[in-house]
Amino acid sequence: MTVADNSANSGPAPASSSAPAPAPAPAPAPEEVGAMYDRFGDLLAMVLGRSALHVGMFVPHGERTAAASLLDLSDLAQDRQTAYLADILADGLPPDPRLLDIGCGTGGPALHLARRTGGRVTGITVSQEQLARCGERLNAAAGLEGRVDFTYGNVMRLDHADDTYDAAWSIDCFPHLSDRPAGLREARRVLRPGGRLLMTEFARRGTAVPPETEAFTRLWASPPPTPFAALLEEVEEAGFRIARIQNMTANIALCGELMHVLYQEQRDAIEQRFGKEAVAHTDPLMEPFRTFCRDHVDYYLLLLGKPEN
């Protein structure tokens, strides 16, 4: 996600009944996504939560945990989401599994996955700043020596041999991809026969007005979400079998609400740290982003399997 860029335009043009719909913005290159996290990763932590920089489980599965602030709530939700996904991926793994964390963020989920499974985890990201944070987390972790490593990596062109990993997960990374089919094919290639990929992904619901879609793509540094049917078709074409689908849409709706509120609360601190240009660009995007998350974005968990043969 990103909250500012250096373009001359401060926001999307107003909709017009007579003007043709603008062409969709091009999908960002991996280097652009990485540069966004390098520059604005700390800003995102101020409005999204500091734990892992992905959508949290605001709607718990039979559990209630107290939080003293909205940012604390976001951290708890992200930790709960990480633990929930790790439990799903851990089920049925072989002893000492090799695991790949695609889009590892600042490293917290990879460390949790290593502890939960007893396996060896490789985390990849396109952000150099996130890699530095991963290193800091790993150095502070106890009992994980030699079991977790982090490196620069682009899932659309993985620098890993075929049939390397027993399982992989990708938490909120695939929404960034300019070529999702390529990412799916690469993930399947590096999995061993019978290996599994757990991923989360957005899907578009209904028809949004262009300013709302553009606000989402700018703030998330992503191409526009596709209908869910398009994702399922790409999964099948990549050669995966679907083992599980879970609709977690309530979490992205609440995430959009929380980001909107936290941005307003943190606006002065954001301006002090990132400058007036950043908030001038971001201000007009927050409300259409909130509306798009509430009215037009579905959020899914998918557990996919690579066939044994």
Image: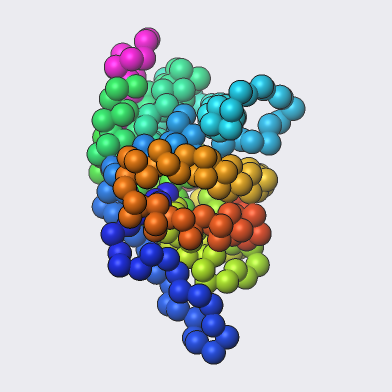
**What residue is rendered at 34% in x and 51% in y?**
276
Q: Is residue 15 left or right of residue 139?
A: right
Q: Is residue 161 left or right of residue 219?
A: left
The answer to whether 172 is drawn above or below residue 230 in the figure is above
**What residue is rendered at 37% in x and 45% in y?**
271
**What residue is rendered at 63% in x and 44% in y?**
254
Q: Residue furthest top?
A: 143
Among the 4 quarters of the image, the one containing residue 233: bottom right
* Camera-nearest residue between 55 and 198: 55
The answer to whether 275 is drawn above or below residue 78 in the figure is below
User: For residue 297: magenta?
Assistant: no
Among the 4 quarters of the image, the one containing residue 50: top left
Q: Horizontal and vertical percent for residue 30?
A: 30, 53
Q: Horizontal and vertical percent for residue 210?
A: 52, 71
Residue 241: in sight, yes or no?
no
User: For residue 141: magenta?
Assistant: yes
Residue 112: in sight, yes or no?
yes
How many marks on residues?
0
Among the 4 quarters of the image, the one containing residue 280: bottom left
Q: Horizontal and vertical percent for residue 299?
A: 60, 50
The answer to whether 81 is drawn above or below residue 10 in the figure is above
Q: Is residue 130 left or right of residue 81?
A: left
**What residue is rendered at 35% in x and 68% in y?**
9
Query: What span is colored magenta in the figure?
Result: 138-150
